Image: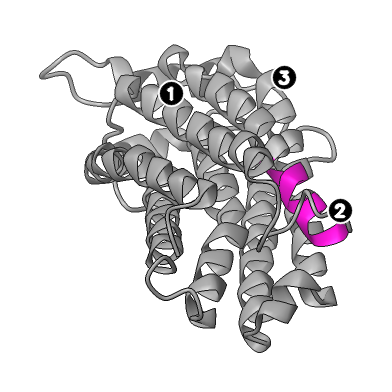
Amino acid sequence: MGLTYRHAISVVQLIIFIPSLLPSLIFVWRHGFSRSAGFIFLVIFCLLRIVGAICDLVTISDPSSTGLYITSAVCSSIALSPLIMLCNGLLSRVNIFIPERFGLFNTSLLLRLLRLVSIAGAILSIVALTKNMSMEALKHPGSLIKIAMILFIVAWVLLLLALAILTRHVSVIQAGERRILLAVGLSAAFILVRLIYAILIWFATSSVFSLYNGNNTAMLIMSVMPEFAVTIVCLGMGLTLRVREPVAVEEQQCLDFRPSQGAPTREYQRVQGLRYDLPDGVQRC
């Protein structure tokens, strides 16, 4: 088998995501491995895309290997999960500035639910594609993969809801962190395009949208380019983020001023400002 249009797209993915992996690893080293740092999911996403592209290119020399096609399909299907989790982690970083409750919504619980739904979608995708490792399974998807896509839709809606809640209270967010909301907003729009493509693959009967032999231009425009856009947006935003210092015991005591509902108290806003703007040599709180 010679080099095809689809293989050329895989080469483009390697050109894009291998260089993106290094700054992602640097951001993880700078900001930590916690979920709230977010960038660990960008590393996972880049690795998935690299592995998937390599498997696709290996089919040039081994076109009969079903395992290569299945591995590439799994990497493509679960890629939505780390993208959504990346945005979730970034919003969790912003969420520390927001009082725990605004009316009926608890943003911390909402973000936790978003994580669970996204992880469940990824698990179901893996199970659905590996349960029956055949090309027929890729051409005629079962109900499990469709349920996984529905979970990703729910996760995206929860992401948008969390973003709307946090954006509504942008005035209490530290100035240097507000750019996260813009980055997540742009990323959510690109993720929606990628999500629509995934939905069309698993629900539509058109030959244009097929994971195995669909239209390659559609895949490039609706899958590869939106994923690359999210990567660039988050990497660009990551370059401008300050490293967050661990919260000291005395500072944590000051955080007790954080109200359980309503607008933040003046004391809480003062404490949040101290987390970033204390001069050298001045003790916190």
Dot 3 crowding, Cα within 10 Å, few <14, some 14–19, many 20+: few
Q: Residue at x 53, y 24 (%)?
A: 183
Range covered by the magenta-colored residues? 194-203
Q: Is residue 130 above or below residue 35?
A: below
Kindly state the secondary structure of the residue where label 3 is placed: helix
Dot 1 crowding, Cα within 10 Å, few <14, some 14–19, many 20+: many
Q: Residue at x 79, y 40 (%)?
A: 105
Q: Nearer the viewer, residue 12 or 109?
A: 12
Q: Earlier in the sequence, mark 1 or mark 2?
A: 2
Which residue is disc 1 drawn over? Answer: 272
Res. 260 image quadrant: top right
How far apart are the alpha carbons under marks 2 and 3?
40 Å
Q: Is residue 123 above or below residue 150?
A: below
Amino acid of disc 3: Arg
The verdict on residue 25 being magenta is no
Q: Earlier in the sequence, mark 2 or mark 3?
A: 3
Which residue is disc 3 drawn over? Answer: 168
Which residue is disc 2 drawn over? Answer: 206
Res. 262 image quadrant: top right
Amino acid of disc 1: Gln
Res. 127 image quadrant: bottom right
Name the spot of residue 184 as percent of width and height, x first.
58, 29
Q: Nearer the viewer, residue 237 or 92?
A: 237
How far apart are the alpha carbons under marks 1 and 2?
53 Å
Q: Examine the rendering and report whether any part of residue 96 can be seen.
A: no
Looking at the image, is mark 3 or mark 1 nearer the viewer? 3
Q: Nearer the viewer, residue 132 or 213?
A: 213
Name the spot of residue 227 as percent of width and height, x first.
54, 39
